Amino acid sequence: MSEAFIVGAAMIPMAKHRESSYSGLALPAVLNALASAGLKPSDVQSVICGHAFGGMLTGQRIVKEMGISTVPVTNVDNACSGGATALHQAWKDIQAGRHEIVLVIGVDKLTQFGGGTLPLVLEDPEVQQGMVMPALYAMRARRYLHERGAKPSDLAEVSVKARRHGARNPYAQFRKEVTVDEVLASRYICEPLTLLQCCPTGDGAAAVLVVSDAVRKRLGLPAVRVAASILHSGSMTTGFRDMLRPEITYHSAADAYEAAGIGAADVDVVELHDAFTIAELVYYEALGLCKPGESADYLKAGKTTYGGDVVVNPSGGLLSKGHPVGCSGVAQAVEMYWQLTDQAGARQVDKARIGLSHVTGGGIAGLDHGACTVHLFESTV
C-alpha cells in the first residue's frame, strides 16, 4: 500500500460571505492549495468534496469552474464530519493505489439559513421533541458541573483560550480576545452555555492535496504524512448513556493511536471539535490528553496552550475560527499541514512533529454521535 501525504493546503477566512456561492467560496481555497503544491488543475486525478448543506453535485459545480472534468468527483455528507470523511476517503484511495493525486474540498455556507440553530432531520424522535445541538451540549455541561464539582467559569476558560489563539489567526472568524467575565456575561443560549461558549455560524472553504509517496518525492515539497485515518459511526444504545464518556471518540482515538504506533503523549498539536466549550473538556479526556475527571484542572494549569503539554486548537478552534460544518474537517487538516511544516506564522507551535485532528458529526436518537473522524499526521520536514 502507498502511504498518503498532504503536499498543499489552503483555506479562506471564515466569515459571513452572504453574497458568495458555494463555488465562489471554494475556488480561492482550491486554487491556492494547488499553487502551494505546484500542481495544475489538469494534474488532479480525483476530487472528493465534503459538505452538509450544498445540495446536489456541489463538488462538480466547483471544479467545472477550473476546467476539471471527466475525473471522478465524489460528494460526501457526514454532518460536521463531512470534510474529515472526504479526507479519509482520499487517504483510502491513495493507499489502495487507485489514484496518486486527490483534491479534497470542504465547504459550507450557513448564512443561507438566516441565523438560529441548524436544521436537523425531523423524522428523528428527539428532534421532534425539540432537541437541537445547543440543548444537547448544555445537558452535557450541566452533567459535567454536577459530577465534577466544576464551576461555570471552568467552561468559560475554554472560550478565553480559543479567542486568545484565534487572535493570532488571520483566517479566524473572531479575532478579539475575551475575559472569563465577558464570556459569562454574554446572553444565555441554553443554560449554562452562553453565547460566547457556542461556535458561530458562518461560511468557509478549505482544500488539501493528498498524494502518493512517489508524487511527494517528485515534487520535493514540504509534506505531512497521514499516519492514521479512522472513521467510526456511533453505537446504538437505548436508555441511559454517560454523557461525559463519548464512546465514539474514545474508540476512534484508540484505533488511531494503535494504527500510527504512537500514544497521546507523543502528540504536539491538536485540532478538536470544540463546537461548545464543554466539548473541549470532554474531548481532552476522550483523546487521552488527560485522565477522566482532570480536564478542567488540565486546562487551568495551562497544559493545552503554548508552553504546555500539547497545544489544543491553535487555530482558535470552532469557537473562534468558526464552524462551517462540512468545511471544518478539511480546515483542521490545513492547520495541521501548516503547523507541521512550520508555516503557521504567529500561531506556530514550536517543534511540532505530530498532530491530531478530531471531528464528530450529527446527533441521532440512540447514537452517541453519527460519525467521528480522527486523523494523525506526522511531519516529514
Image (cartoon, rainbow, N blue to C red):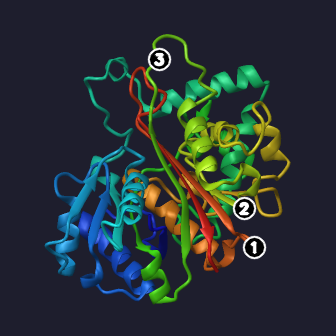
Give the mark nearest the N terminus, 2 or 1.
2
Q: Secondary structure at mark 1?
A: loop
Residue underneath mark 2: 268
Say which quarter of the image contains residue 228: bottom right
Residue underneath mark 3: 237
Q: Where residue 127 sits in the image (x, y, percent)?
A: 35, 23
Residue 85 is at least partly visible in this image: yes
Compared to residue 127, the image places residue 97 above or below, namely below
Compared to residue 115, the image places residue 5 above or below, namely below
Residue type of the residue flagged with mark 2? Asp
Callout 1 crowding tier (Cα within 10 Å): few <14, some 14–19, many ≥20: few
Residue type of the residue flagged with mark 1? Lys
**Alpha carbon distance from label 3 to label 1:** 42 Å
**Alpha carbon distance from label 3 to label 2:** 34 Å
Residue depicted at x 49% and y 85%: 217
Compared to residue 360, the image places residue 168 above or below, namely below
Q: Mark 1 and mark 2 in contact (Cβ < 8 Å)? A: yes
Q: Secondary structure at mark 3?
A: loop
Callout 3 crowding tier (Cα within 10 Å): few <14, some 14–19, many ≥20: few
**Alpha carbon distance from label 2 to label 1:** 8 Å
- Residue nearest the viewer, comparing 146 with 1: 1
